[in-house]
């Protein structure tokens, strides 16, 4: 991807903070939309995820899709099995891209700093809604306390969605059961029929044709998430019209790229995703929403790996892989808006609050991001195949340090030694700390 993408760089971000600047997120962030896949590739994906996130909503569009409570529990066990094999005594993990092209080590273990035994990563399971999902299945899922949401794919809308919902009104009893037990409805918000609707208009049409009537018909206790919004119409709907029980996730690739990345100077399959990248005015609307400080918008990467051969094909799969560097890519986007102080809420708080989950603040780890460029490998191991990550062969401006309190203290200590004030409004500050006011790391 490097050679092609460098001919078509993304819209230039404004450089608003100096090299070496560090910011601290108050906890490992949450990803409210992630594709872990299944089989050997899951371990490779998890290697990246645990370096980026504390929790993640696990998308259910496997083959076959995760349609029952039992299937979700079994999938969760397979994910946890990938997480339990290693527990290092190391107290921190700088950004070390694991499983790169030269790494031929097995794919059955993870060199994560810590494991689920320490509650440092938790997969949040979901069910895949079909025309036949019953209220009883919802009650059963809710009783497990590990299944948090159901995903509504309009049939045929995206990868592995053929068994999705053909008519959402048929599922109203099921959705009411979800409202009753507090289970979140996640929606791939694009119409899939009639097929004549232009691919760039499918999200906008979904809002008018499906979402507004659905929100009207459902009780306000049903929490609804428009996943991976991609248009200014979605931003306007969430901001100005949607009630408080409706929110949206935004991906880092929709914040950083417009459709030129996909289509100018040759077609670039690794920028193909659904919803498809849109015009620049839509990207700017998404950037403004994500960095607005509104709790109705929060982080969901929709990181969706496919083997390189499945992307570089005459009929390439939809999906962009960002698990290797998601929070660093979000940092680039937020920096471009001069809004790094809004990243903590977007990445660590608003999604948890909406889902009714406790914030991760007690996890005992913080995340330090440093304005320090690193080169993304051309590919990563992905089961028996390889996956091309976003920004392959190119630099990312920020580096992550999945952190312990020790490192946060060290950074603060160094700042004190330099007699620097921590001030998010001061562009010259070398160390910013966006922890909550209760944090002992805030310098008064
Ligand atoms: Zn997705």
Image: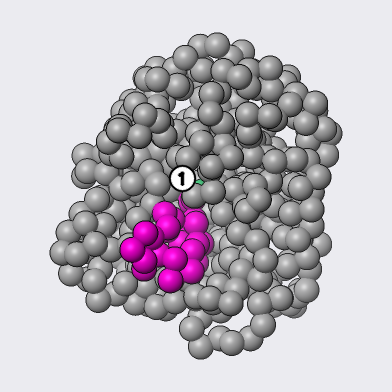
Q: Position of residue 340 (x, y in %)?
A: 39, 50
Point out the image quarter for the N terminus. Answer: bottom left
Return the x and y of residue 229 as percentages of the image width and height.
40, 38
Q: Is mark 1 within 8 Å of ligand 1?
A: yes
Where's residue 47, x and y in %? 61, 70
- Which residue is at a point 51% across and 17% down the rendered structure image? 215
Give the quarter of the image for residue 12: bottom left
- The stretch drawn in magenta includes residue 305: yes
Q: Looking at the image, what colour scheme do you see?
A: one colour
Residue 14 appears left or right of 385: left
95 or 423, nearer to the observer: 95
Q: Which residues are magenta?
A: 301-324
Residue nearest the viewer, comparing 168 with 58: 168
Query: Is 138 positioned to the left or the right of 7 in the image?
Result: right
Q: Look at the numbered disc 1 and give the secondary structure of its residue.
A: loop
Q: Is residue 3 left or right of residue 142?
A: left
Residue visible at 51% across and 80% down? 100
Residue at label 1? 158
Magenta-span inclusion, residue 290: no
Observer able to see residue 317: yes
Q: Foreground residue, 96 or 17? A: 96
Q: Is residue 150 left or right of residue 98?
A: right
- Is the stretch drawn in magenta largely helix, strand or loop? loop
Q: Position of residue 90 (x, y in %)?
A: 69, 77
Q: Quadrant of residue 390?
A: bottom left
Please say if 145 is above or below 12.
above
Q: Residue at x 34, y 26 (%)?
A: 205
Mark 1: few/some/many CA within 10 Å (<14, 14-19, 20+) = many
One can see residue 440 in this view: no
Position above or below: 433 against 311:
above
């Amino acid at each position: 991807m490097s050679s092609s993408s460098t001919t078509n760089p993304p819209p230039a971000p404004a450089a608003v903070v100096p090299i070496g600047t560090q910011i601290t997120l108050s906890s490992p962030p949450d990803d409210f939309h992630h594709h872990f896949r299944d089989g050997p590739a899951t371990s490779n994906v998890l290697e990246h995820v645990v370096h980026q996130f504390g929790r993640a909503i696990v998308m259910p569009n496997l083959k076959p899709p995760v349609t029952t409570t039992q299937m979700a529990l079994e999938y969760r066990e397979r994910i946890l099995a990938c997480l339990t094999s290693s527990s290092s005594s190391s107290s921190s993990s700088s950004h070390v891209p694991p499983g790169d092209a030269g790494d031929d080590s097995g794919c059955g273990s993870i060199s994560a700093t810590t494991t689920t035994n320490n509650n440092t990563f938790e997969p949040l399971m979901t069910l895949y809604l079909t025309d036949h999902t019953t209220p009883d299945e919802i009650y059963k899922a809710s009783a497990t306390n590990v299944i948090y949401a159901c995903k509504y794919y309009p049939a045929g809308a995206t990868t592995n969605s053929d068994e999705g919902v053909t008519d959402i009104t048929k599922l109203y009893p099921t959705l009411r059961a979800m409202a009753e037990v507090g289970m979140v409805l996640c929606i791939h918000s694009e119409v899939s029929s009639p097929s004549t609707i232009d691919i760039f208009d499918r999200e906008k049409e979904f809002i008018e044709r499906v979402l507004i009537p659905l929100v009207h018909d459902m009780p306000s206790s049903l929490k609804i998430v428009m996943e991976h919004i991609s248009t200014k119409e979605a931003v306007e709907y969430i901001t100005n019209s949607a009630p408080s029980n409706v929110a949206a996730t935004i991906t880092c690739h929709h914040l950083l790229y417009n459709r030129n990345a996909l289509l100018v100077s040759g077609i670039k399959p690794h920028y193909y995703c659904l919803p498809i990248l849109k015009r620049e005015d839509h990207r700017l609307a998404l950037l403004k929403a994500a960095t607005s400080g509104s709790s109705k918008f929060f982080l969901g990467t929709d990181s969706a790996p496919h083997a390189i051969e499945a992307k570089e094909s005459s009929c390439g799969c939809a999906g962009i892989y960002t698990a290797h560097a998601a929070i660093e890519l979000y940092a680039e986007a937020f920096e471009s808006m001069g809004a790094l102080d809004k990243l903590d809420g977007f990445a660590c708080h608003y999604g948890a609050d909406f889902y009714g989950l406790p914030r991760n603040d007690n996890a005992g780890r913080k995340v330090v991001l440093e304005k320090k460029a690193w080169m993304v490998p051309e590919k990563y191991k992905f089961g028996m195949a390889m996956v091309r990550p976003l920004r392959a062969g190119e630099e990312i401006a920020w580096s992550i340090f999945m952190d312990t309190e020790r490192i946060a203290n060290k950074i603060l200590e160094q700042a004190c030694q330099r007699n620097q004030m921590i001030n998010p409004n001061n562009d010259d500050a070398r160390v910013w700390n966006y922890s909550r006011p209760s944090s002992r790391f805030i310098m008064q």
